Amino acid sequence: MLSVRGLTKSYGDRRVLAGVDLDVAPGELVVLLGANGSGKSTTLRCAVGLTTPDAGEITADRPAMIFQQIHLVRRRSVLDNVCAGGLAGLPPSRSLVPALFPKSLREKAMTCLSRVGMADRAADRAGGLSGGQQQRVAIARALCQGSTILLADEPVSALDPAAATQVMTLLAELAHTDGLAVAAVLHQPDLARRHADRIIGLLHGRITLSAKASEISEEDIAALYAPDRDAA
Ligand SMILES: Nc1ncnc2c1ncn2[C@@H]1O[C@H](COP(=O)(O)OP(=O)(O)OP(=O)(O)O)[C@@H](O)[C@H]1O
């Protein structure tokens, strides 16, 4: 599982995280909501090791992360992109040349592509896919890393409503059916309420809301995005 305790982070004088605790259990999809600059991305980036916190404890066994900007190699095949997720286990001499990806890695990558419903596009160039399809391939690549913790930073912000629903449904399935611990930052409270098990709300680097998605009210959501009285 993912466990974060007492996370603090400042950039210069600006305190971005002021003691964030976050648990995500296997089988659970947790969505982080909050206004721009409230610290959502920084929380995930600290959890995955991309940002070093000033203080706090993080327990996360090899989490994998996906982003709004999907970093696939556009001219390479979908399968090669997913294989790249499993490269950490290969000696460098073999990992640099896609033709040398071992059969076992290609098979694992195909299993991951099947899991996200993209196996039939394995041989296509990644750059030829729609945004929603590319995000599903990025999820397959994260799965190919073998992690049981998946962190998603605004995974559907660039997608149309149908593709966004498809990706959120997939993330929920990966939690509920495959037992992954999944945390996603969203800017769409409606999607969060529809798909999340739990919603965490951040305001000025603190968690001010944490409840089952079914128990979150309109007022709870509005309070997260209210005009900033402190800064007025
Ligand atoms: N590398 C950095 N250097 C300086 N300030 C940063 C850096 N990364 C983030 N910040 C600042 O930290 C604050 C929180 O940023 P963060 O990206 O975590 O917020 P967020 O809740 O994810 O916002 P958004 O919804 O806009 O993505 C912001 O004020 C941001 O400008």
Image (spheres, helix red, strand yellow):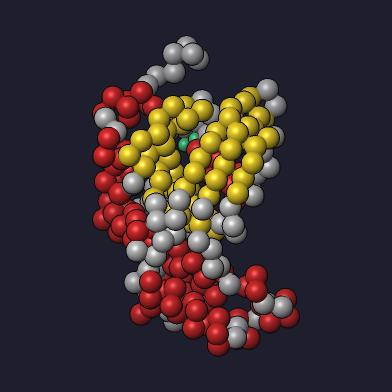
| Residue in the image at 35% along x and 59% along y | 176
Can see residue 127? no
| Residue in the image at 40% along x and 56% along y | 27
Q: Quadrant of ligand 1?
A: top right
Nearer the observer, 71 or 22: 22
| 220 to 171, vertically: above or below | above
| 42 to 15, vertically: above or below | below
Task: Give how far across and how far down residue 139 sits, in percent.
Answer: 45, 63
| Residue in the image at 54% along x and 68% along y | 146
| 70 to 2, vertically: above or below | below
Q: Is residue 68 left or right of residue 4?
A: left
Nearer the observer, 163 or 29: 29
| Residue in the image at 38% along x and 26% along y | 225
Rendering quarter of residue 216: top left
Task: Give how far across and how far down residue 151 sits, in percent.
Answer: 49, 52
Give the total number of marks visible in the rendering: 0
Task: Give how far across and how far down residue 155 sits, in percent.
Answer: 42, 52
| 216 to 99, vertically: above or below | above
Can see residue 105? yes
Rendering quarter of residue 90: bottom right
Task: Give how far across and how far down residue 33 sits, in percent.
Answer: 41, 37
